[in-house]
Image (cartoon, coloured by chain):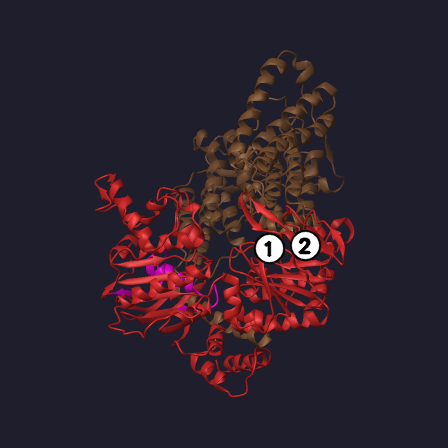
Chain colours: A brown, B red
Amino acid sequence: MSAQNTAAATPAAKSSAQSKALTPIAWKFPITYSILALVSLICFGLIGRDGETTFRIATGGDFFAIPDVVVSSTVAGLVLSLILVILAAASIYLALKRITLAGWFPMVFGILFVVSFLAWAGGGSGGVIPLTTLLAGALALSVPLIFGAMCGLVGERSGIINIAIEGQLLAGAFLAAVVASVAKNPYAGLLAAPIAGALVAVVLTFFAVKYWVNQIIIGVVLNVLVVGVTSFLYSTVLTENPGLWNSRQQLPNLPVPLLSDIPILGRVLFDQNILVYIMYVVVIALQIFVFRSKWGLRMRAVGEHPKAADTVGIKVNFTRVRNTLMAGAIAGLGGAFFTVGSGLAFGKEMSAGQGYIALAAMILGKWNPKGALLAALLFGFSKSLGNTLQSIGTPVANELLLMLPYIVTVLAVAGFVGRVRPPAAEGVPYVK
Amino acid sequence: MTKVFGSFVANDHIDLTIEPGEIHALLGENGAGKSTMMNVLYGLYDADGGEILLDDKPVTFAGPGDAVAAGIGMVHQHFMLVPVFTVAESVALGYEPTKSMGLIDLAEARKKVREISARFNFNIDPDALIEDLPVGAQQRVEIIKALSRNAKILILDEPTAVLTPQETDELISIMRQLKEQGTSIVFITHKLREVRAIADSITVIRRGKITGVASPDSTEAELASQMVGRHVSLTTEKDDADPGDATFQVRSLTVVDKAENVVVDDVSFDVRRGEILAVAGVQGNGQTELAETIIGLTDPRLGSITLDGKDLVGKSVKDRLGSGIGFVPEDRSTDGIIADFTIRENMILDVYDRPPYAKGLNLKSAVINDEAKKKVEEFDIRLGSVVDPIATLSGGNQQKVVLSRELGRDLRLFIASQPTRGLDVGSIEFVHKRVIAERDAGTPCLIVSTELDEVYGLADRIAVMYSGRIVGIVGADTSREALGLMMAGVPADEALAATAAPEKSDAATAAPDDNCATTSAEETK
């Protein structure tokens, strides 16, 4: 038996060696890198802007102060651009050799490009780039996205496509604001938000599992429904007596001793409210439990091959419903960040499409918690970058800066989505 | 036991007794109700009548979980394995050994796989991904799954459909081993040879009813007539081929799939006018892709396809159909027909846009109707009306519609993939006769089949594919054993030499010999 298996392996290895020679050269990424490197070289380096750019790293009250980094805009642009050109050339060389780029390559390239861009953008006006604020903003803007992406991930790994993340975020934001306001306690809002998200999931699973309604359609309908209901209640009830129904409540920041004193990242990561800490726990727990627990194994089985799960006595639809409700609760928590998490009152349609971006983050992260986290951070960062640049004033039009996160979304999904594999049975109702 | 789907009685008062430690074969044609019955037994379907007795005690199964708890294991025809799981995960699923907090004890799961794998000499790596395993190994994983839950009764649903003859021999010896250790086996099949090789007792089932109990000593012809209900000829009658010029040539054809795997690897062959070249091989060795590349559904990376002196590579499917290719696809229900279209519409899917069926933007309904009726008569299609959706027909009649469409034009080349898959014996006879008639009319025919019986029935020459390559092209008189070795990748001359060796009596003793042959082939490479 073993002899036969090895015999089977040999011709396969032979033909894969032959396939190497046949594979067409993958030009997509080298061309993208080259264009970006040239843009950086010409715009940020050669044309450039006179003056200096200040990267402000420290904020008041740090454990020890780090001085601002001041660089000449054109020199920084030129140096960084040259590195980018070298990297792009390397990518072309590797493509010719048909060697796939390592995972860190796009990350390093992206970071260098962004710094080069910042050096250019901050120049001229002698602008100050507040790095810590930029990163803190990125995390804050990512929180709802991360919760949303985790919700989508748990749903789709179980086989239910959840387009209603947007609605779940909005419902969570609404209920958190109202409950916190009435109870005069932001933590009460935090308890209410998951319930709102789960309720949306109840409707979703009811139609998707019980009546086999197309999950994309029911998801979109739910989003519209939640916008309608919350907007209606907002303009009738909430605006009648904002003091009672919609007063601002904010979750206080709870700095973690020691960790929060680490320069730059300590501030950003460990001087946050409890919702952000919950997010850390959720992401880490999912990363472990999705792949290594009984719950995760069964969830993935149900999402990949429900009939196989059924034949070993796993209740497919029950598993799907339970997990999707749980996922809804996670998205609801993410919604709470819009209101009690940020100390804002509820406003109409305040989730503003973040649920869809969360969906994109999940896909870009290949249905992995770790990957989805990174993707959500990327989107959050691009939005924060847009905000920062708007406030310091740059030659780029404000409207273009506002588009930044969405451009990044489209590019990222278009660039990578071809290579990911969703759970095989997602969106397919299980009928015995 | 009785099971009804709508007005269709799949199982009509079936009585079946399985003795401990016996191999009980359940023999019947496709659609006879064998699988339905086993799914009821396994708790996947609810029975509409009757009862199940285990050791004389009546039991009811609300779901497969109950059946497993009662000691029933099942290996489904389509494996119930998640492709992205590892072997250990697949075996653990549903019965996971856990540590604290619901985390899976993978070490324990691996140990279990290794233990059972070692006991039966399965050679399965617990950390291999299911999708990377060959079909035979996946089947062994399924058996490990059932055994890990202490199955006393093991149901094997068409277990040999996807195996090479050698893998089948291995499976049969595994079944013997299981039997010796006291496991009862229910073996569902429609292949007569295997039944005679392994079964202790045989129950024949036809149209949902038990038609008889046979002994393993019955001849194949006796079993076949019990299974079909009338006398059938198991061999296709045909005259010797009278081949003409090689008008269809494939040279160095190489096809690569989306994941950059070479699926057709440097394939060259000719098909002459008036001959049938059968492509044999285990499912998934590039036959499907070969056929789809010839018709133009995929583009080759390298190589040429020449018909009547013209290169077809780069031409559209429509152009290729226009140059006279008839194509019967492998998967009838998704590629051969449009289920919601009427029968007459399905008959003109390839010619709907040209006279006499069309004029300008209009379809000529009357002409289409007349033609459809003619074809129904010619191909003996049993139907209500030609304007019924084709989904209302049985598989055999659907396939006849496809054939009537593809053979309805003047052909320069006829390609059929698995032309009789899922068909009953009667329809198979008919399809084979039509294919041979087309050959006798002078058309080069290329038949892709994984059923050796079909290959022998039709072929004038046999090309064996393994791992995307053509291992060899041999005559139709080549022995089954030699073909089996070639299907496992052994080059033609070695396979012929190995099987010409004198000492060989039956399948069980042949198996080790085969392995030696494979090993030597491996060494010479």
Identify which residue is drawn at 52% across, 38% down.
A382
Looking at the image, is mark 1 or mark 2 earlier in the sequence? 1
Where residue B490 appears, x then y in whole percent?
Answer: 47, 77
- Where is residue A277, by image quadrant? top right
Three-letter amino acid code at disc 2?
A: Leu
Where residue B65 appears, x then y in whole percent?
Answer: 70, 51
Does the segment drawn in magenta span residue B239?
no
Identify which residue is drawn at 30% across, 50% down.
B350
Residue under numbered circle 2: B93
Q: Compared with residue B333, is residue B137 higher up or lower down, i.e. above or below?
A: below
Q: Secondary structure at mark 1?
A: loop
Whether residues under marks 1 and 2 lie with C-beta atoms below 8 angstroms apart, the answer is yes
Q: Which residues are magenta?
A: B279-307
Foreground pick, B137 / A184: B137
Residue under numbered circle 1: B82
Task: Classify mark 1: residues with Cα within 10 Å, few (<14), some (14-19) or many (20+).
Answer: many
Q: Compared with residue B384, is residue A211 higher up or lower down, i.e. above or below?
A: above
Residue A186 image label: none
> Which quadrant is the C terminus of chain A positioned in?
top right
Foreground pick, A250 / A301: A301
Does the segment drawn in magenta span residue B280?
yes
